Image: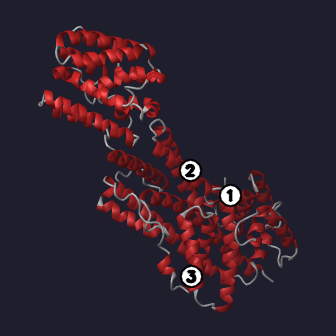
Amino acid sequence: MDLTGGLVARSGSGGMCRESTGLESLHLVDEFRQLVTLPSENAGGSFTALLELPATQAVELLHFTDSSSSQAAVNGIGGDIAPPPLHSFGTLTFPSNSALMERAARFSVIATEQQNGNVSGETTTSSVPSNSSANLDRIKTEPAETDSSQRLISDQIPCPSQNNRSGKRKDFEKKVKSSTKKAKSSEENEKLPYVHVRARRGQATDSHSLAERARREKINARMKLLQELVPGCDKIQGTALVLDEIINHVQSLQRQVEMLSMRLAAVNPRIDFNLDTILASENGSLMDGSFNGTAMQLAWPHQAIETEQSFHHRQLQPPPPHQWPFDGLNQPVWGREEDQGHGNEHNNLMAVSENVMVGSANLLHPNQVKTEL
Amino acid sequence: MVDSLFPSIETIGDASSESRRKKRKISETAETEAEIEARRINEESLKRWRTNRVQQIYASKLFEALRRVRQRSTNENVKVAGAAREIRETADRVLAASARGTTRWSRAILASSVRAKLKKHKKAAKLTGNCKSRKAATETKRIRLPAVDKKLKILGRLVPGCRKVTVPNLLDEATDYIAALEMQVRAMEALAELLTVAAPRTTLTGP
């Protein structure tokens, strides 16, 4: 296969370049060119997004014949953000590349299935060029992605670097990075801290921070929903204040329930007869009295339909002791409400609320009800 | 919609739902997996507390609470507060029952009421805040602010049965509890209105 052949050749050239940089750099440059063009042909969205004009950059950078330029080519291709600083890395990539390839070969068995999931994540993480070796790995894996059958060697390394979701991949990335850093430190010590920083920025590279990030995201998502639920929390910044609001809201709701229960307790003794009769008289003209059927027949809500008919019976049986004068008033209102309601429940509550409003001798307007409460 | 029946709280609910919809549109493109999951949970719980259940809870509470209070009132007419407590607890129980046992707080409410009946209030206080131990406490880093922690504890105390519950679960439970409480308040308001309006009528126009 083209690409595997290219990879193998590159590893061979990488190994050789320790001895002689000049020829090897050219050789590698050719390899890079091959790799760059091939993926650009096959490229899915992720690869082009990753490489951001890989062809032009690669060609540009490949004009340089020294090892630093090839290094830059590697970095420029893989790393979108800052190609110039990478020129100074010199010959670091090649030994690290071979080390990486060895590691990749070792880990190749495990991460093949992870490869597929990482394609989507790659674009998100492509903005951070971890280091030259990681970039090289990315280049390697771009062609690898497009042809899943052949992706054995290079599948491992970019996957961890590009997807924050899996701890396993992060471990691989960590190991890879540590190996590359070791290789790098042996060559150039002053560049190492810089690479460290660039490697870590914006990425969770170990399983702990990864899991913590996932947990944080979960909590933040739930907090956002709570914010939307509780009125007045949208404008507030900060978890503590939002939680304050939520706590206040819950406490106020509970207090409201207390107040209402006291009101109900106060109201109840005044009713000397059965509530059923009240509802019977009020809802006498309702076509479907399913609402009150459920109320009267069942302690816990279950089948509304069943109780509907029983309520009808009950409704008809006890003769209302008094005809309320506004039954006639209620008729047109109920008729209107019934037409509007979709299901039984809607009609019932609408009728009841209408009763509430109408029954108070037209004193309680809807506005009044709102303001009162 | 059913919500139109409860005008007072419905305005608040509309505002929050509108803002929710707006936010949904804005943030749809940037939703992470966690957000999608949380939103699904939230929508599900909210819808549950706003549609059919409303009617059933309302009806059941109506029946149960009044029956009990009528029973009590025949015995001990004087104590309004005691009757209020009974009503509130009955209302909570009906609310919890309508949750169908899917949430912790509902199970805690029902369990506490059962235990109170059996053990005569002695062991209820002990057993209400039990069960799930806190998991994943080892990896907490950022939401370990002491201020936030305190508030989370307070929230855990407010929501019944959620003292020793993990933070994401606590937030889920709080979401559902708030939705349920809002519905309960709306139902009780309508019921109270109905009764306070009906009562003078009956006395006036009764035979």
| SS at badge 2 | helix
Label 2 to label 3: alpha-carbon separation: 33 Å
Task: Quickly name the residue at label 2.
Answer: B43
Residue at 73% in and 81% down: B203
Label 2 crowd (10 A; few <14 / some 14-19 / many >=20)? some
Q: Position of residue A128 (x, y in %)?
A: 30, 30
Pair 2/3: label in front: 3
Task: Quickly name the residue at label 1.
Answer: B52
Q: Position of residue A226 (x, y in %)?
A: 46, 54
| SS at badge 3 | helix
Eyeballing the image, is A247 above or below A140? below
In the picture, which quadrant includes the N terminus of chain A?
A: top left
Amino acid type at mark 1: Asn
Chain letter belonging to callout 3: B
Work out whether mark 3 precedes mark 1 in sequence or the reverse, and give the earlier one: 1
Asked whether residue A202 appears in the rendered view, the answer is no
| SS at badge 1 | helix
Task: Quickly name the residue at label 3.
Answer: B116
Label 1 crowd (10 A; few <14 / some 14-19 / many >=20)? some
- The answer to whether residue A156 is left or right of residue A64 is right
